[in-house]
Image (spheres, rainbow, N blue to C red):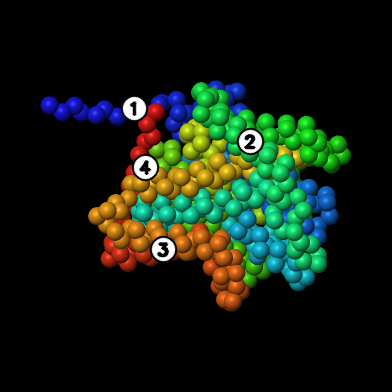
Amino acid sequence: MTTARIAAAPDPSNTVDSVPPPARLFALGLQHVLVMYAGSVAVPMIIGGALKLPKEDIAFLISADLFCCGLVTLIQSVGIFNVGIRLPIMMGIAFTAIAPIISTGTNPALGIGAVFGAVIGSGVFAYLAAPYMSRLVRWFPPVVTGTLILVIGLSLLRVGINWAAGGQPMLFRPGGPVPNPDYGLPLHLAIAGLVLLIVVLVTAFGRGFLANVAVLVGMGAGFVASIALGQVSFAGVEAAPWVSLVLPFHFGLPSFDAMSTLTLSLIMVVMMIESTGLFLAAADITGRPIDSADIARGLRADGLGNVIGGIFGTFCYTSYSQNVGLLQVTNVRSRWVVAMAAGVLVVLGCLPKLSLVVASVPQYVLGGAAIVMFGMVAATGVKILGEVEFTRDRANLYIVSISVVLGLTPLLADRFFSQLPPVLARFMQNGTLLCALSAVVLNLLFHRGRAHERREPAVQRT
């Protein structure tokens, strides 16, 4: 006699559409903000410095960026009409577009007006291309999706490890790069290790809400320890105004340059491929199946984000991988938590004094938490690959192995493509794009061109 196995019913209080109680909702949302804050603030600081903008304009770029991050995240998670995937996806400013933006902005014939024109133009392109890009989902079976997400996670680990050491190993100065004397200081490593240890202990021994905010608790403890050791500077906080509205066209009306717009549009193709992988990962984590129409709505949000960014004086927007990793860490699936985070970002964008306080969290504090979250992105890829048949279909071994190596090549050998023509080298340096192209092409080759429908993500057991 056999006994049927009855699957546990999903927890109705922990779904994509559930709304946690207000205090819990705010704390979980704040955790998402702190996870993505450093990366989001870094981009306007890098670009503003490269364009030699005055300090007050760089401060505006940061405020505008936070404000737009909130707006675009609301659109992505809550949705309006046919825009927004309605999953717990945090949107942030994209690192991928930094190089072409600086190239356009430093061109005396173009300037910052052409930057915002190119951002808006590339957003319109992405919005119109979204339905066509979304149809690629049928070429993303688990062997492709799992490989892509694994490489995204592994690529992010370098960022998290550098944060834990206190920043970048090299600093760029007018005379050229110089070693960062603060990189890898024992104090930085100790506090990053403390944050990591607290996250692990709270996750292991905490229950309920406490376990869900383990990352927030760890970062809070690291921040307090840094303040106690005199490692935190609040410079500029006192002089900053309490309230400052973010208004459109702060830098004047945009101008439109065809080549700059085309360059950013090509970058958006890469970013849309990355976003598709993250959408599929979020669907797998939350247990909500998605189809090409859902992905099209999500990609439209990427495009609309650029349009909003160009109008308010910031740059290109994309889905943030670290926050997808946080979904796996907390197992909180509600998109309204991310919507709360979006509201916090909008408020921070209008409160420069408070923004500077949050921006004072040292990078090594964030690094201790990032090691967990970025590792979780990679672990999500491993989880998806666990559903792939490797024994009877050994071709999948080749797909994964070759695609992972190609995807990590720019990370492991940063000069590997340096002798190629500059435009081609720029694209080959994107490991995510290399991995995606390799996995899709090899899957088609080994499976004789047969498209594979992606499986519906299994609902996680509670």
Q: Secondary structure at mark 1?
A: loop
Q: Amino acid at mark 1?
A: Ala
Tag 4 near tag 2, CB within 8 Å: no
Q: Amino acid at mark 2?
A: Val
Determine whether, in the image, residue 49 is placed left or right of residue 376: right
Q: Give the quarter of the image for residue 243.
A: top right
- Compute the Cα span from label 4 to label 2: 32 Å
Q: Amino acid at mark 4?
A: Pro
Q: Residue at x 65, y 50 (%)?
A: 162
Q: Determine which residue is flagged by label 4.
A: 457
Q: Look at the image and tell me in which quarter the N terminus lies.
A: top left
Q: Secondary structure at mark 2?
A: helix
> Where is residue 353 shown, x and y percent of the image?
79, 37
Which dot marks residue 402?
3
Q: Residue at x 34, y 44 (%)?
A: 456
- Compute the Cα span from label 1 to label 3: 39 Å
Determine whether, in the image, residue 41 is placed left or right of residue 232: left
Q: Determine which residue is flagged by label 2.
A: 195
